[in-house]
Image (cartoon, grey):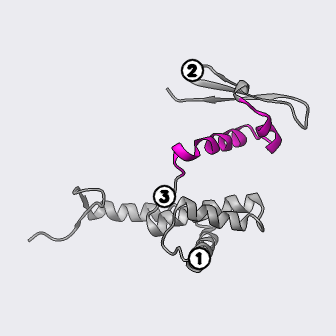
Amino acid sequence: MMSSNINYSPEGNESIPQEIEEAVTRATLDLLPTKSKKQYELAYKRFVEWCDRNNVAGKYSENVMLAYFDQNSKIWKSSTLWAHFSMIKGMLNVENNQDIKALDDKYLMFKVVAVMGILGACRREELCQMSLNNIEDLGNTLVVNIPDSKTRVSRNFTVITET
């Protein structure tokens, strides 16, 4: 009889050697920054407790997180919401092997706006004023023109895809 140092992946019948499983466990634990690990754990603990109080314990999904952050948006600044989202998402990956991702078919526009806001260092008003006419598609490069707003100066940035 063989020793049980081979595990089976949850996706199928492929066997995974014990050394690989241990490497995955180590790598997963390394996902959390050492200096702020306690903050991550505290943010996760608060989220789990909120889930327990709201009868959604163990049902961690995009919708549950949306409800959690919607409720907290009334008391937290946007930077705090973002930090807590990032920490909880990391902890869900480590503790539950669950990677919460917003599906493209439902959230693609939000992702595009977030990327453009971050890459272009855009103000809220600038994003609201933008239209498809502000984006020039050059094949593997997008040139984004940010209309003038508070500074009365328009500016550009580019998004280049890998080929």
Q: Residue at x 70, y 43 (%)?
A: 118
* Residue 105, numbered circle: none
**Residue 33 in sight here:** no
* Residue type beneath disc 2: Gly
The crowding category of the residue bearing disc 2, from other C-alpha atoms within 10 Å (few below 14, some 14 to 19, many at least 20), is few
Compare marks 1 and 3 and give the one earlier in the sequence: 1
Q: Secondary structure at mark 2?
A: loop
Residue 146 in picture, x, y percent from top left: 78, 31
Cα distance in 3D space between marks 2 and 1: 48 Å
- What's the residue type where badge 3 is placed? Asp
| Mark carried by residue 99 | 3
Q: What's drawn in magenta, residue-wise?
A: 102-131
Tell me where residue 45 sits by quadrant. bottom right
Please tell me whether mark 1 sits on a helix, a strand or a loop: loop
Kind of residue at disc 1: Asn
Q: Which residue position is annotated with label 2?
A: 139
- From the image, state whether disc 2 or disc 1 is nearer to you: 1
Q: Nearer the viewer, residue 116 or 106?
A: 106
Spatial CA distance of label 3 from label 2 is 32 Å
| Residue 71 placement (x, y as % from top left) | 70, 67
Q: Is residue 78 above or below residue 2?
A: above
Location of the N terminus by quadrant is: bottom left
**Image x and y of residue 17, in percent:** 25, 61
Marks 1 and 3 sit apart, C-alpha to C-alpha, by 21 Å
Residue found at x 61% / y 76% = 50
> Is residue 4 in the magenta section?
no
In the foreground, 36 or 136: 136
Secondary structure mostly seen in magenta is helix
Residue under numbered circle 1: 54
